[in-house]
């Protein structure tokens, strides 16, 4: 096939049949390298998740019939800038439209299925709906329309009187009236022309033809090439370290022979020393650990290795030759080469899964490795990479643009309204006479932490891996202990360690919307080693002085959700045995960890007895933090985060417990918390008295939220009644006031019937 954008369509007769998706992948993607693949009669429904019908490196768009038969799919390679156009779709048609951007030109690609044996009224509805759709988008000179599909027209020749066609001349005349052309001239099922390629830009098309059916299907594959230069598939360079080949004896000797007294001499410049130490670790590592630059590309299906790709390249060359010569010998050579490539793929895939099965069944396989292997199998069904993003009326496809869009969205979640720091704090009342104002560490403690590092964790922006730190724990513990003590004594946390690399992780719904992703932050490991030292002292101090409420089970040793659930369940069952009922209120905090008010958190640390250089250290630890989003090796510009506890940090969860600790102080109901999940429990005989108590507590919680800039989500805040009574309980409304708007919201009841 000539260079350009390769487009095809075929009727699948159910993409869900065993092995069918693999056949399409091998034939359409690996052998013919189609960029855009239209599928009709997918037989999908909304109960089928996208990953069950995904093809590696392709975005899938779908219209499900949700009953027997029908349905259409449109696969578009992820190197293209594209977005679904639901505004062009009609509920009366099985159709998907996607806009593909090509520099200054855009192509509207649609796939449509018309079921056979429609009556006259149904045919008229179809023709009218198709006319309205096409008529609304024809016009702009920098736009092309391509409509693929199985229209079940059943004509023998397109340019004929269509007497044998179920549609007569209705579809033919519709296409002609809109100055469009249907390009397929060969039969696509037996002697009938069912599958069509309709366009308003025939001059852009070359090499329009049909291929033989895939495997045992009865529809041929129609295809054409749009004469535009396709964008390159994304790839980027990355340095990888061959840690298993490292000379760690030599690396440790280099660190041991370093004159650390000279290194730390002179004026105390914590920032400069942090950067100097990072450069030194990199310099010595380069000398002792082999490394190389590799190209990161989109991943393939399991079983698609270099040898299988080579066989498919051979089959592709023979296919080109057979099309050119039409010699039966060349055609047979192509079929044999294709068969050999497919057999090699299936054998390679079988070996891939059998090797994984052997590791899973191995009794020596760790729990972590078990889940890693599980992800290796099922993770291949998850869409690879991030597709083009939609921002207002724009489509963002470049990695730099996507990174910037994500970073702006994520960093906005970690900001409070302007002027928040000018708001007054409550009257200061210490909660303890104890004081923690200084922390020091030792090389022994640092060595223990370095030896406990998980070498499978990703690195932060400083590029220092856990493997290097663990292998060199004996030699690095001394300079690191000096650096950490210097940081704690002067009350300063290095700015170099405050930059987080953020990776967007898809959650659910539309993959082209930034709000459907969550951030995962990667911080420098050295910063987290220092945090672990501080966390150990602060946590022990809080527990020894009984500063953390027992009502919160989150992030505590020897406590868990299981303990809390057993406790709550026991209380409820005891109340029911006493012939009392229970009201359970579930409160949800919006962006709990991301919206922590730094000024308020430092105030509460001071209430806990944190003073002196340690309080100053926490102040610098929280302030002036930045983050950057990394996509395909491209990073956004760093943006500030002015609120929240640092995501991915060691101290973040403990600091959040301290921040939310006094939420339970003035409540009359029985509160239970797990981190930010807040739960109120009230037992009652009289619903009116119970609702009065609960509403009083909800008012207290609202006031607490207003003081500490914590916003409760009224949509996710719900309640339920636990009772043995068969008659419904007339429980009064529960009201939650939302700050800063001061709007009162009636809490919804959680229906568990």
Image (cartoon, helix red, strand yellow):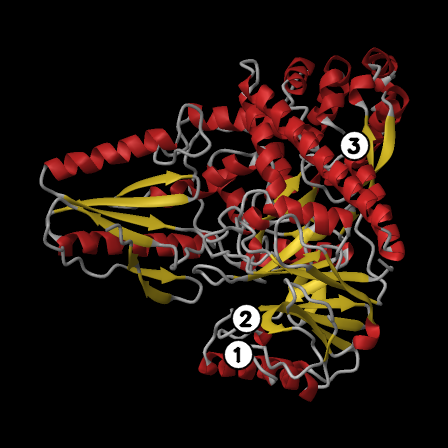
Q: What residue sits right under mark 3 in the picture?
A: 274
**Label 1 packing within 10 angstroms: few (<14), some (14-19), many (20+):** some
Quadrant of residue 481 within the rendered picture: top right
Frontmost residue, 152 versus 280? 152
Image height of 631 relative to 268, above or below: below
Disc 1 is placed on an element classified as helix
**Label 3 packing within 10 angstroms: few (<14), some (14-19), many (20+):** many
**Residue beneath the point at 41% across and 40% down:** 661
Q: Using the rendered image of the protein, determine whether residue 117 is visible from the camera's viewpoint.
A: yes
Residue 582 located left or right of residue 511: left
Quadrant of residue 133 within the rendered picture: bottom right
Q: What residue sits right under mark 1 in the picture?
A: 126
Q: What residue sits right under mark 2 in the picture?
A: 114
Q: Position of residue 448 (x, y in %)?
A: 64, 15
**Circles 1 and 2: CB atoms closer than 8 Å:** yes
Image height of 483 relative to 654, above or below: above
**Residue beneath the point at 65% across and 46% down:** 23
Residue 472 located left or right of residue 152: right
């Amino acid at each position: 096939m000539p260079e350009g954008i390769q487009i095809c369509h075929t009727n699948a007769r159910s993409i869900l049949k065993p092995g069918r998706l693999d056949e399409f992948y091998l034939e359409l993607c690996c052998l013919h390298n189609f960029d855009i693949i239209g599928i009709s009669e997918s037989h999908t429904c909304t109960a089928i998740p996208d990953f069950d019908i995904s093809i590696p490196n392709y975005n899938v768009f779908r219209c499900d019939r949700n009953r027997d038969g029908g349905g259409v799919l449109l696969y578009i390679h992820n190197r293209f800038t594209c977005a679904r156009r639901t505004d062009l779709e009609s509920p009366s048609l099985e159709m998907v439209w996607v806009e593909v951007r090509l520099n200054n030109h855009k192509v509207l690609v649609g796939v449509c299925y018309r079921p056979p044996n429609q009556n006259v009224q149904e045919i008229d509805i179809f023709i009218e709906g198709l006319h309205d759709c096409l008529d609304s988008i024809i016009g702009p000179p920098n736009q092309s329309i391509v409509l693929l599909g199985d229209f079940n027209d059943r004509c023998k020749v397109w340019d004929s009187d269509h007497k044998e066609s179920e549609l007569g001349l209705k579809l033919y005349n519709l296409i002609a009236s809109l100055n469009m052309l249907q390009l397929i001239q060969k039969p696509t099922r037996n002697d009938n022309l069912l599958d069509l390629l309709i366009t308003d830009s025939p001059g852009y098309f070359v090499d329009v033809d049909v291929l033989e059916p895939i495997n045992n299907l009865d529809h041929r594959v129609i295809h054409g090439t749009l004469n535009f230069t396709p964008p390159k598939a994304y790839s980027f360079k990355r340095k990888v370290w061959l840690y298993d080949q490292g000379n760690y004896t030599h690396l440790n000797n280099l660190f041991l022979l370093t004159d650390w007294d000279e290194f730390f001499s002179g004026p105390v410049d914590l920032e400069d020393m942090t950067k100097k130490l990072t450069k030194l670790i990199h310099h010595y590592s380069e000398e002792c650990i082999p490394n190389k630059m590799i190209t990161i590309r989109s991943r393939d299906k399991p079983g698609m290795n270099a040898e299988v790709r080579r066989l498919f390249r051979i089959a592709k060359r023979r296919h080109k030759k057979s099309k050119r010569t039409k010699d039966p010998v060349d055609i047979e050579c192509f079929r044999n080469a294709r068969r050999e490539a497919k057999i090699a793929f299936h054998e390679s895939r079988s070996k891939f899964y059998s090797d994984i099965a052997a590791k899973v069944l191995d009794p020596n396989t760790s729990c972590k490795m078990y889940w890693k292997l599980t992800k290796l199998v099922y993770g291949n069904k998850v869409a690879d990479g991030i597709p083009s993003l939609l921002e207002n009326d724009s489509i963002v496809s470049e990695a730099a643009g996507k990174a910037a869009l994500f970073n702006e969205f994520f960093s906005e979640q970690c900001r409070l309204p302007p002027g928040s720091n000018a708001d007054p704090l409550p009257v200061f009342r210490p909660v303890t006479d104890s004081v923690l104002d200084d922390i020091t560490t030792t090389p022994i403690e640092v060595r223990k932490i370095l030896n406990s590092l998980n070498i499978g964790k990703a690195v932060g922006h400083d590029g220092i891996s856990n493997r290097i730190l663990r292998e060199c724990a004996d030699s690095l513990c001394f300079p690191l202990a000096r650096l950490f003590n210097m940081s704690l004594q002067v009350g300063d946390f290095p700015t170099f360690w405050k930059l987080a690399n953020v990776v967007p992780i898809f959650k659910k719904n539309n993959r082209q919307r930034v709000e459907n992703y969550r951030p995962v932050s990667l911080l420098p490991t050295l910063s987290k080693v220092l945090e672990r030292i501080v966390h150990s002292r602060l946590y022990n101090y809080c527990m020894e002085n009984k500063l953390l409420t027992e009502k919160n089970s989150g992030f505590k040793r020897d406590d868990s959700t299981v303990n809390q659930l057993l406790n709550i369940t026991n209380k409820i069952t005891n109340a029911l045995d006493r012939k009392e009922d229970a009201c359970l209120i579930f409160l949800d905090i919006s962006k709990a960890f991301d919206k922590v008010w730094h000024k308020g958190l430092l105030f509460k640390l001071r209430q806990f007895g944190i003073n002196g250089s340690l309080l100053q250290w926490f102040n610098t630890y929280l302030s002036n933090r930045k983050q950057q989003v990394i996509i395909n090796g491209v990073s956004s510009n760093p943006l500030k985060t002015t609120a929240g506890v640092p995501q991915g940090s060691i101290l973040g969860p403990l600091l959040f417990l301290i921040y939310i600790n006094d939420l339970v102080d003035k409540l009359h109901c029985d509160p239970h918390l797990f981190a930010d999940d807040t739960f109120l429990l009230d037992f009652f005989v009289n619903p009116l008295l119970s609702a009065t108590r609960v509403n009083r507590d909800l008012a207290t919680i609202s006031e607490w939220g207003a003081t500490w800039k914590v916003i409760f989500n009224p949509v996710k805040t719900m309640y339920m009644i636990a009772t043995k009574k068969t008659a419904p309980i007339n429980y009064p409304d529960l009201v939650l006031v939302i700050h800063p708007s001061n709007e009162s919201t009636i809490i919804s009841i959680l229906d568990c019937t």
